[in-house]
Image (cartoon, rainbow, N blue to C red):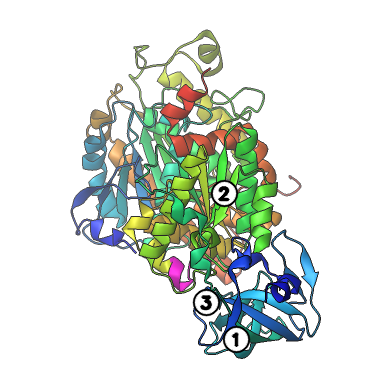
């Protein structure tokens, strides 16, 4: 057996690793100074600039705080040209399956069969993150989406990726399971430019709004409506004061790093409480199903 | 002598052998692959012997059969080794393997009892051995890149996990997409059902280790198995095949399979794998083992696909596609597999018209 464990960095360090079984997906792996939670890994997904170093630098402190490994995959333009939508079309490499292959390998390497990911993404990375969660909700413990350009709305009458009507290239979405995932959405309150990096079209603008702020608000409303119907934890939306579309500034100056950290810590606390309640045979929860529904 | 051999029931494993070369029965210690004339003494687990045409002929005490000495490793049946000497031994596979049983699965009857009467020998008194009848040994073997011949491995969690069914479904689906497929069995013990089934699935060519001169691959080193795989590749190219499917018998924990997965030489011969498993834990462990070895896993199938709950469990633990037999007839799955094997760019170019 190849000693893939030897590819891993020491505590407090990061390595760029290419696993032989997943040659198309280089990953940056950061081991926190002190690992406290092996049941989670923090997966940070870059935007279309594919600036993985920026992701690595900004999320390292969070990984240290959380005590879990940080994984920053590189979805190259050559191999995964439309990773934001998981795949560029039938027969094209699947960004979601590449990540899942890594997770399967990671579970095996560390003996963590119940490992789930804390998934964070910015811009194109946030597009990837929520679409990944729609298709693979069982892999995700919590998700923070930063300033996605547009979204897949929970509308099965609209074709994916604007909606969730099935596409030939991907499996069906698992909306109900995705709605159960704790979700945080952030966007700068000045992120209203319709520049070349924002996809625009008449249909998209009509459905989602004209800029990232409107689109985030509408998607959150649509998701929250469904979550509340089912008494699931509702998605949170946080506006970043004075912030435009800039990952580094959002994280360092706009308070996004702190918001994401607090959200992930709270999600973990809730998950632990829920597990403890289940173990104790209690069913009480912060979000109680309303009697008579469903 | 020839008349006696002609009257004997000839087993599948002799399908490449020229029995007209046998002029005498010799004595001596059998070696793996030696052809043996044996007598059926007591019919037990294997009640029939598969002939070279695939028909399973019923056995009766007193029947004479032409078989080959070889080891067998089958978790669901027998663990057996080449007989130490002629005389009393067992028929341990319907394909025609004579061996001495070391262990058997408690779920099967004792092995059919036979007596090895003698080694089939040529005019010089030399025992005939399957290694003499290996059509693949006539091929010139050159390095074949994975771009020239994408190679899809089918690896299973264990015996009877659905590997052959999965390999055949893949072969059939890809053939229907217009590709010429060679389907091969790299390891195991000579037996016809898989061979015929692969042909039935529409494989343009089927070869197995028997065509490389081996009755069984039990105990073989990775370098020997890689040499056979390279013969398969040379054959596939000669036959004009577009894709090679390679089934490996037994499960990932079987000693030779473990050694194969630890061999860089083998890993480098494979484009990607499909995993067959009979349940979620088996699927998870097998896929993880294959990934850990350095081989991409395209999906999971086999017996697990019969159980929606097991599929859900495996999907949650692996996140990889769970494929049932019909999936290989869906364009999206074919595109996914072909794109993975050929590389998306080449596949798209080839299909752009």
| Front disc: 3 or 2 | 3
User: CA–CA distance between discs 3 and 2?
Assistant: 31 Å
Q: CA distance from mark 3 to mark 1?
A: 23 Å
Percent from the top left, x then y, of residue B96? 65, 72
Secondary structure beneath dot 2 equals strand
Nearer the viewer's eye, disc 3 or disc 1?
3
Quadrant for the N terminus of chain B, please. bottom right
Q: Please determine whether, in this image, residue B242 is positioned above or below residue A284.
A: above
Compared to residue B73, the image places residue B136 above or below, namely: above
- Pick the residue in front: B229 or B171: B229
Q: Which residue is mark 3?
A: B127
Q: Which residue is mark 1?
A: B101
Task: Determine contact: label 3, label 1, CB under 8 Å.
Answer: no
Sequence-first tag of 3 and 2: 3
Q: Which residues are magenta?
A: B250-257
Q: Return the x and y of residue A151 as percentages of the image width and height.
A: 49, 26
Left or right, B54 with reference to A271: right
Query: For numbered disc 3, what is the local secondary structure?
Result: loop
Task: Determine if the magenta segment contains residue A207.
Answer: no
């Amino acid at each position: 057996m190849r000693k893939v464990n030897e590819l891993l960095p020491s505590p407090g360090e990061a390595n760029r690793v290419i696993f032989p079984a997943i040659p198309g997906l280089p990953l940056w792996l950061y081991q926190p100074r002190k690992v406290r939670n092996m049941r989670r890994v923090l997966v940070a997904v870059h935007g279309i600039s594919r600036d993985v170093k920026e992701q690595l630098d900004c999320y390292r402190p969070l990984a240290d705080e959380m005590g879990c490994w940080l994984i920053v995959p590189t979805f190259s333009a050559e191999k995964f040209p439309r990773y934001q939508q998981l795949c560029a079309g039938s027969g094209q490499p699947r960004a979601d399956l590449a990540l899942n292959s890594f997770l399967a390998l990671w579970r095996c390497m560390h003996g963590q069969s119940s490992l789930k990911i804390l998934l964070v993404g910015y811009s194109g990375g946030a597009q990837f993150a929520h679409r990944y969660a729609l298709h693979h909700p069982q892999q995700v413990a919590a998700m923070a989406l930063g300033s996605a350009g547009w979204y897949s709305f929970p509308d099965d009458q609209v074709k994916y990726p604007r909606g969730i009507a099935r596409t030939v290239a991907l499996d069906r979405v698992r909306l109900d399971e995705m709605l159960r995932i704790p979700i945080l959405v952030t966007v700068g309150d000045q992120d209203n430019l319709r520049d070349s990096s924002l996809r625009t079209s008449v249909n998209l603008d009509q459905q989602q709004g004209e800029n990232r702020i409107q689109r985030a608000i509408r998607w959150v409303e649509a998701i929250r409506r469904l979550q509340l119907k089912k008494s699931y934890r509702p998605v949170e939306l946080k506006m970043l004061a004075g912030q435009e579309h800039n990952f580094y500034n959002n994280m360092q100056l706009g308070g996004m790093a702190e918001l994401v950290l607090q959200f992930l810590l709270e999600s973990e606390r809730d998950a632990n409480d829920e597990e403890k309640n289940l173990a104790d045979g209690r069913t009480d929860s912060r979000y109680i199903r309303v009697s008579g529904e469903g | 002598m020839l008349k006696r051999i002609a009257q004997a029931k000839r087993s599948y494993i002799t399908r490449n052998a020229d029995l007209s070369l046998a002029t005498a029965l010799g004595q001596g210690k059998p070696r793996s692959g030696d052809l043996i004339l044996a007598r059926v003494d007591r019919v037990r687990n294997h009640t029939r012997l598969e002939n070279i045409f695939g028909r399973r002929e019923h056995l009766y005490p007193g029947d004479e059969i032409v078989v080959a000495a070889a080891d067998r490793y089958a978790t669901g049946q027998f663990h057996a080794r080449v007989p130490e000497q002629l005389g009393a031994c067992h028929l341990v596979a319907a394909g025609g393997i004579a061996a001495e049983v070391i262990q058997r699965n408690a779920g099967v009857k004792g092995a059919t009892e036979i007596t090895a009467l003698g080694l089939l020998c040529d005019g010089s008194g030399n025992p005939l051995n399957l290694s003499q009848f290996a059509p693949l040994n006539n091929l010139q073997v050159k390095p074949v890149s994975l771009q020239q011949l994408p190679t899809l491995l089918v690896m299973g969690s264990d015996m009877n996990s659905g590997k052959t069914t999965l390999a055949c479904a893949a072969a059939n689906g890809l053939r229907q997409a217009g590709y010429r497929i060679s389907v091969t069995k790299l390891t195991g013990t000579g037996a016809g059902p898989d061979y015929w089934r692969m042909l039935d699935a529409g494989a343009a060519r089927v070869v197995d280790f028997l065509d490389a001169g081996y009755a069984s691959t039990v105990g073989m080193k990775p370098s020997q198995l890689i040499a056979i795989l390279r013969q398969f590749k040379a054959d596939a190219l000669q036959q004009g095949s577009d894709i090679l499917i390679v089934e490996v018998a037994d499960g990932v924990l079987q000693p030779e399979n473990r050694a194969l997965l630890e061999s860089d030489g083998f890993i480098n011969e494979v484009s990607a794998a499909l995993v067959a498993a009979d349940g979620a834990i088996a699927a998870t462990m097998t896929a993880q083992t294959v990934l850990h070895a350095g081989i991409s896993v395209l999906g999971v199938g086999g017996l697990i696909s019969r159980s929606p709950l097991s599929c859900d469990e495996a999907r949650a633990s692996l996140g990889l596609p769970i494929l049932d037999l019909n999936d290989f007839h869906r364009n999206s799955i074919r595109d996914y597999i072909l794109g993975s094997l050929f590389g998306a760019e080449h596949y798209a170019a080839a299909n752009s018209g």
